[in-house]
Amino acid sequence: MKTVYVPEMMCQNCVRRITEALTEAKLDFTVDLDTKTVSINGCENCLKTAISELDDLGFSAEVR
C-alpha cells in the first residue's frame, strides 16, 4: 500500500470528486479527509494512475 498526501483536499466535496475519479479508474483505495491522504492498494502503475487522476482534478499529490 502506498500513501499519497493531498494537501488541497479540504472538504467532503473533494473526497467525493477523488472517490469518483479513482473508482472510475478501477483502483483499490481509501480516502481519509482528516489526514488528507489517499491510500492506494496495488502496483506501481496503480500509484501512477492515481497520481495522474489527482492531477487531472487539480490536486497535487505527494507520495509518502
Image (tube, helix red, strand yellow):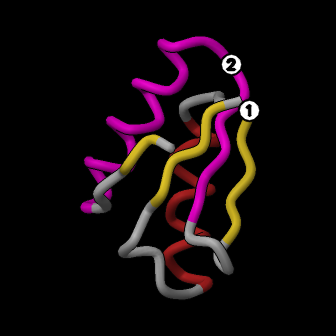
Q: Tell me where residue 12 appears, x and y as whole percent.
A: 61, 84
Is 50 covered by the magenta stretch? yes
Which residues make up the magenta segment? Answer: 37-58
Mark 1 is on which residue type? Asp
Residue occupying the point 44% across, 41% down: 63
Residue occupying the point 64% across, 28% down: 26
Q: Mark 1 or mark 2, which is nearer the start of the sequence? A: 1
- Looking at the rendering, in which quadrant would you find the N terminus? top right
Q: How many marks?
A: 2
Q: Secondary structure at mark 2?
A: loop
Mark 2 is on which residue type? Gly
In the image, residue 49 sits, relative to residue 23, either above or below, namely: above
Query: Pointer 2: what residue?
Result: 42
36 sits to left or right of 54: right
Residue 51 disc label: none
Task: State the residue lying farthest toward the front.
Answer: 64
In the image, residue 45 sits, relative to residue 4, either above or below, namely: above
Residue occupying the point 46% across, 75% down: 9
Query: Pointer 1: what residue?
Result: 28
